[in-house]
Structure formats: structure tokens, C-alpha cells
Amino acid sequence: MEIEGKINTNQQEEAIDFDKLKVVVKKNILWIILLFLAANLAAYLTIRWTKAVYESESELKLDVRKDASDFGIKTLVDDQNLNMISGEIEQIRSKTFFNRLIDSMDLQVNYYSIGQVLNFEMYTSSPFKVRYNPQVAIFDQPIYINFLQGNQFAIRLQKDAKPMTGNFGKKLVFEGMELIVDATTRVSGEDDNDYFFIINSRPELLSYLASNISVEPLNFEANTIKISFSDFNPLKAHDIVNKIDSVYISYSNEQKNLANKQRLEWLVHELGQVEQKMEGYETYFENFTLQNKSNNVDDDLKKTILMINAVDSQRYELSKKISNINIIINQLTTSGDLSSIPYQNLPPFLAQKVEELQVLTQNQNKLGLSYNETTFAYQQKQQQLTALKNQLFRQLADVREDWQKTMLELNQKKYRLEQQFASMPDKNTQFTKNQRFYKLYEEFYLTMMKSKAETEIAQAGSTPDFKILASATLPVVPKSPQKMMILGIGLVAGFMLNFFFIGFLYLMNNKINSIQEIERAIDVPVLGSIPISVNSSSLPFHFIENPKSRVSESIRTLRTNLDFFASDHGRKVIAISSTVSGEGKSFLAVNLGGVLALSSKKVILLDLDMRKSKENLPFDIQDKSKGVSTVLIRKNKWRDCIVKTPLANFDYMPSGPHPPNPSELLLNGEFSQLLADLKTEYDFVVMDTPPVGLVTDGIMAMRQADLSIYMVRANYSKKEFLKNLERVIRINKLNKTAVVLNALPDSGQTYGYGYYQETKSRNGLWGKIRNS
């Protein structure tokens, strides 16, 4: 149960207090209205002070007809690998195109008429035109001009500068700039309008076009785009879009031809480079063929191997012959016996000589068997044999020398063939490499020749065809500002600002606004509430002069609720206090005492605020030197200090002179004795105490009371005051304390309709104590 109570309490604290919300709204209704009006006024001024922007637009269809296909050759389009739509959009937004557009239109000078709020550009309707020298012009600055009497005008650079006078149609040197102002209409001195013109620089015009143009694709498959341009002048926007369409057609065609021209120039240049390289390779092949007597290195390699083998065979055979002839010479030199010498490999004439020598040797040997060596016949044979040997020796030596020369020639030939064989792999590698590069350049050359032919045909046959699907529109309704949207934003902003403003005030409001806030804040019973009234601030005895009012009825309700706080002895001492002044404790003390007196009860009201006497009482005090303070110091008897009021059974005791020690006077026994004496004479003793949040006097009085009524004023008392009350009750152990909420705003409910009546009082002085 305790947990559920806490949950309910938290839910109540989180819930919106609509009574508090109503109070916040009523209290700040003027600011709420002003904030709402300010938001809507800002929307209106935004519309009033914002120039209307107009947008003209057109639609184009981009189509490239490839007429070169009639030749049977596949054309190469410049933008083959690019998105044509994106390329055309970028071309339109390029500075080159903007420069072409600027040169084709008269945008160099803007003419304006000065208005009370906004300036108006007089496009094609200016009463004057300006001619100037662009070399010494003043760019991007307003130059003001006014018409004078006759054919004169006044011109100045700044509004407050001294003007210079000039004549229409005549040259004028102004601020170092040469210009001529021509009147387009009949100039009259009665024209009091103020004008100015601006000479635009090219960078400014480029920025103006780039910031106001919009090029968007409509359909990629259909190759359609939308061109739009925004400006403050609808006719100017219309003319610029028209000019963009016309300039774009010619400009795009030029750009495409220029691209083809540049492509052809590149191809011609590259073809020349390739031709030079191919000629170098052809020269190399020619020299290679002349040097090697062949252009087939593999065949030459095989031939060289065969020639080396053949030379080796010749060298082998010749070596054998030289070896044989050396043997014969040795035999011939040493023994002369040539019978066992092979002579088949010898030349025929030498073989014959060898055979003759062998035969002659045999004959000599036979003759030596028959004859003596000293015989003539033997000696004659010997001479023939010696002569033949000498002849054979010389012939063998000559042949050997010839064979040795041949052998040397064969060795040299073999060496040359071996050197040639060793160099052939490098030549083969270089030859093969050059052949490969030659083939690559040949293929590249043929490809570029083909591209050149196709590009020439494409340049001659491809023509751009641009169709204007929708010409430039002349805008009538401005693109911005959107008046209804801005007004709607202002309306919504007014509500939203007030929502946050009220919410902020609601959250920042730390004042007590309802009985529920009191019940949630402290565990102190609420005796009742007093509603606010238009007359409650001017009626001292409100229940008498306005008996049927809601305030009077609430005070009677408080009187009835006092029975629940009855003391044992039947006499009641009621202390009425508050945290600060102005919460209505004096008002309640007077009226509650009066209501109790009307119920045939004797009531006395004690003014215990001895620090501040009340001057605006509803009755006169004859002797202000007597009162509570003099009774407590035993200077006067309490009966001598009683002031009779016009209301029967209702007496009043003033506070008396200001003592230096009011707190100490309430602590002594005289104050308790005074209350005891009064309770014997009166049914109710009502004490109007000082605010407990300022001094401690009120707390001392509350200790002596049978019931302590703590006043809280709605929308005036802070929530911290309730914490102060709780602390006072806890410290001083005040068992019987109740809270009364004063000046509670009307919740708007109609309960009791017909029973309550409000009557304004003619006496405005008595009610001043209500807020004391």
C-alpha cells in the first residue's frame, strides 16, 4: 500500500496541473498574444521584404544521328564511353559556354529603380542606357543617377556623395571612367524617381549565371534534359533560357567538330611518328640481309655448322697427307729405303717418282750383287739414284709447303666460321626482337589509319540534332517566396513559440497555484481556500458588503471547518501567519473574526505584529500609545487597550508602540497570562502574527495557539514556503496547524451558478489590509 501511494504521488506530480497552466496563460496572455503576432508579423515582413524569384524553363531532346553508317563503316563517337546526358549537362554549365552566352546577350549593365522597400530591375524598360569604356570602367558598384531639368542628369558613386552633372548623349568623365548616358525616352524634369546602374564584370556575370542556372536530366533513355533559370525579373529569365537554347545548338556543334579536328590532328602526328620508327626497322632489316647474305638466321646457322664440319674434314685429310709426306721425307733423308712407305695419298707425279725411286733402288741392289760398288755400272746407277732422290726430296718439300699453306688457310677459315657461329645467337635475338616491334608498330599503324578514316567520315557524316521539346516559358507566378507556405510557417511558429513559451513559464513557475500542490508538498491539512474576487482587494469586511460572493462563502466554510480543531476547554486561540507579507493573513484575520462574531461568538483580534503597525484599519484607533506591547510590559491593562469595532461581538487590540524587543515580550509569562485572561472573556482569540519567514515572533504566538492557520497566496507564495512551514512544524512540534490558500484563481467551473453574486464596494480604503 505504501508503494502504491508513492507511485500515485509520483504520477500526480508528473501530471499536468491545468489550473496552474490556466494561471500561467492568464498571467502572460499579453505576451502570448504579442509572441503570436510577432511570428506572423515576421512571416508577413519576410514576404514583403523578399524579392519574388521567377523561373523560366525549357526542355531539349539530344539526338546524334550517325549518318556515316551509310558508308558501311562503324563510326567512333567522341563520347562513346561517356554518358551523353551528363556530358551535355557539364558542357552547358561550363565557363566556356557561359562566356559565349555573355557575348551573345546584353547583360553587361543592370538598370534599377530605387523603391521604398525593394529595388526593381528595369530590364528592357530603362529610361536610359549607358555606354562605357571597358578598360577603365567601375565594375560591380552601384552608380546613382537622377534626371534634372532639360537634358541634364546628376550622377554620383555614393548616395551621400556630391553629384556630378552631365548631359544626355555627351561624353562624361566620371571617377576616371569615360561614359555616355543616352536617354531612351523623353526625359522630363518631373521624373523624381531615383535610379542606379551596375556595370557587371565578367567574373560577376559568370557567377550570376552559374548560381541561377539549373540543368537536370528528364529521361536518360530519351536523352531529354530540362534547362531552367531563376531571376527577379521574369522577362530576363525567359530571354536567358531562350538564348541558352539557341547558343547551345551552335556551340555544341562547334565543340563536336573541334573534338574531331583535335582527334585527327593527334592521329596524323602519331602516324608520322610510327612511320619514322617503321622506316628505321626496315633499314635495319635491309642492312642485316646485305651483311649476312640472308634474312634467315636459322638457315645461316645450319650452313655455318656444315661448313665448319667440311673444313674439319679437309683439315683432317690434309693433316694425314702432311704426316705421310713428312714420313717419306724422313725415310728419304735417313735410309733412302722407300719400299714400305705408303704413297697412295701423294699427288700422282710424286707417287710416280716414288715408284721410280723404288724400282731404281731394287735395280741397284740387284746390281750390287753382281758388281762391285766401284764399277762404272754400279756408280752410274748410284748417281741416277741420288739424282732421283734429290729431285724427289725437292718435290716433296714443295708439296709439303703447299699443303702447310693450305692447312693454315683451313685453320683461318675455321676460326672465322667459329666466330661467325658464336655471334649468330645474338644476331638472331636482336633480329627477332626488332621483328616483333616492327609487327606491333605495323598493327598500331594500321589501327590508327583505320581510326583516322573513320573519324574523317564521322566528322563529315555525324551531325548533332537537337530538338526543343518545350520552348522557354514566361513565368507569371513567382517560384519564391511561397506566400501561403511562409504564412503557414508563421502561423505554426506562433503556436509553437507560444507552446514552448508557456511550457517554459509553466516549468519555471515555482509559485503555489492549487490545493493539490499543497497536499503533495506537505502532510498538513488544508482548512480551505479563498477564491480571488474583483472586490476582495477593496472590501475590509467582505462578508458584510458582499455577503453572497464566493469569497464570503469560502470564509464561512473556514468557520465551519474550525469545529474539527475544537479544543477540550471549548475556547479557541487561533494564530494566523504566513511566510512573507502580502499573502493575506490580515485579510483572513479580520474577515474570519467577523464571521465568527456574526455567529454570536465573542471574538477579539490581536495585532501581534509589533514591528509594523497597520495604518489602514476599518475602524479608528483613538489612542495608539496603548496596545499589546504596553500590556506585555504591564504598562496598561488589557481591557484598557480594547478597541470596539462597528461589528458587534468583535473587538480589536492593536499592536501598540514598537518595542525594541518584541520577541522577548512574547516569551515572558505576561503573553501567556494575556491569552488566559482573554479566553475567559472571549470565545475566540484571533492572533494576526508577523510573517514567520521574516521574524520568529509568529512562531512564538503559534506555540500558544489552539490552531495555527498558515496563509498561502496562489501565484504569489513560492513552493519553498511550504518546506519552511514543514520545518517550523517539525522543530516547534505544532500539532494543530492548517493551511489556507488565498486568492485561488477561478477554475472556470460553473458550480453554484445563481447563488454567488459580486457587488463592487464604494469604500476602497478598508480593503487595503487584505494584502498586508
Image (cartoon, rainbow, N blue to C red):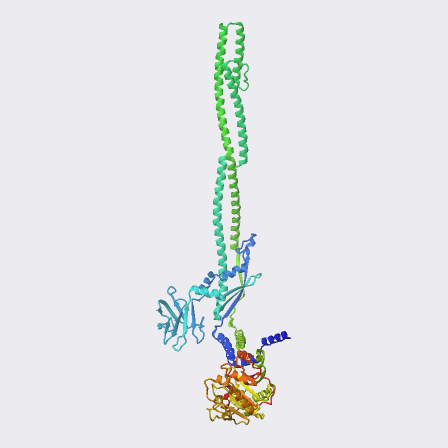
Total tally of numbered discs in the picture: 0
Q: Can the viewer see residue 196? A: yes
Which quadrant would residue 736 be assigned to in this image? bottom right
Residue 764: tell me if it is visible: no
Residue 268, placed above or below residue 611: above
In depth, the one of 234 and 520 nearer the eye is 520
Quarter containing the N terminus: bottom right
Task: Say above or below: 590 vs 469.
Answer: below
Q: Nearer the viewer, residue 383 or 459?
A: 383
Residue 323: give x, y in percent of width and height: 52, 20
Residue 82: image x %, image y %? 54, 57
Tell me if residue 686 comes above or below residue 374 in the rendering.
below
Give the residue at the far right of this rendering: 1
Name the residue rendered at 48%, 16% in the picture.
Answer: 393
Depth check: 442 or 456 in front?
442
Q: Is residue 752 left or right of residue 394?
A: right
x and y percentages locating residue 772 in the rendered image: 50, 86
Q: Where 532 sits versus 388, above or below?
A: below
Could you tell me residue 36's position as x and y percent?
52, 78
